[in-house]
Image (cartoon, rainbow, N blue to C red):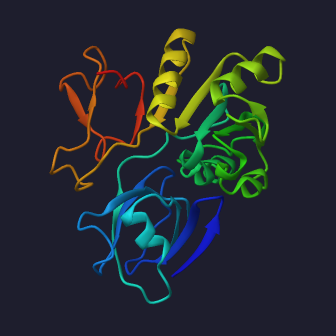
Amino acid sequence: MSTSPCGDDGVVLKIRVESPQPPLRAARFWMLRREDRLSPAIPRPFSLYRQQGDELEFLIKVMGAGTKALAACTPGTKLRAIGPLGNGWPTLDGEGDMWVMLAGGIGSAPFWMGVEQALAGMDGRAPCPPSKLAILYGAATKGLLYDLEGFKGLGVRVETCTMDGSHGLKGHVLQLLEDLQRRGELPHKVRLLACGPERMLEAVEEHARASGLPCWLSLETMMGCGVGICNGCPVPTLPDGPMGAWSNAKCCVEGPVFSIECVTMGS
């Protein structure tokens, strides 16, 4: 186990799990907590950031007691790690429109492996060409663009924006997307993947619906159990969508990734 600083308020936590792990789909998650009294009793969900066999990495924004406890882990610290859980990104193929990934702050976490898997090819599909992938990364300030140089090293286009103008375009990711499209640097017809703060995801959903774009959201809801028992992470479904038989979907089981054909961020 190890931790390393990342950005102004983040860490990358690396752990080794006891059971063998097959290659895991990007955007799946684990419930993590320390086994001592420093962590809250209920584990917290974290997207898998990177995987090397049984070594798993998590990109963590240090905010409250639970994340502070994880950030303070040292070699030998015992963790409870429940996973892998949930469903990840769709297969990112190179046969259709360009994939544009919209990341907000710590919402960049599920995209590293998403890019790696797209470039390698998944589910029997040919590798996706780098030219069909782009990451638009936004945050409040430059220091909250976590592991930016690492993302740039993945071999796909990375563009940034910050609300204070300290890095890239001054503004948010949708403004960045529209700016690049207006200048002809990105096509208007794209497939969107998004992860970030709730208000950002609401705006992305609204934009995708208005523009008629396919869109998948990785949601950051509050989870109690992570396995569908507590019903604490409901997401409203669309009555005429493929999940419309139930008024809510469980984010931890059916998600955290949902197509906007299935759910809505609205109430």
Front-most of residues 52 and 149:
149
> Where's residue 12, x and y in %?
57, 67
- Which residue occupies the foreground of this view, 236 or 43? 43
Percent position of residue 188, x then y: 70, 16
User: Where 240 sits versus 34, above or below?
Assistant: above
Q: Residue 139: x, y in percent?
A: 63, 41
Judge whether 155 appears above or below 191 on screen.
below
Quadrant for residue 243, please give it.
top left
Locate residue 73 relative to residue 148 in the image: left or right.
Answer: left
Residue 170 placement: quadrant: top right
Question: Where on the picture, by quarter, is residue 258?
Answer: top left
Question: Is 196 placed above or below 146 here?
Answer: above
Of residue 258 and residue 38, the one placed in the foreground of this image is 38
Residue beneath the point at 63% across and 40% down: 140
- How many marks do you count on the picture? 0
> In percent of the image, x 63 and y 49: which residue is there?
121
Which residue is pictured at 65% across the width and 32% down the height? 100
Examine the rendered structure and indicate whether residue 230 appears above or below residue 103. Answer: below
Position of residue 102 in the picture relative to residue 76 (left or right): right
- Residue 32 percent location from the top left of the image: 36, 67
Camera sees residue 51 = no
Q: Residue furthest bottom?
A: 76
Is 109 positioned to the left or the right of 38 in the image?
A: right
Could you tell me if residue 93 is visible in this image?
yes
Q: Residue at x 41, y 72 (%)?
A: 69
The quadrant of the picture occupied by the C terminus is top left
Left or right of residue 247, residue 103 in this image: right
The residue lying furthest to the front in this view is 164
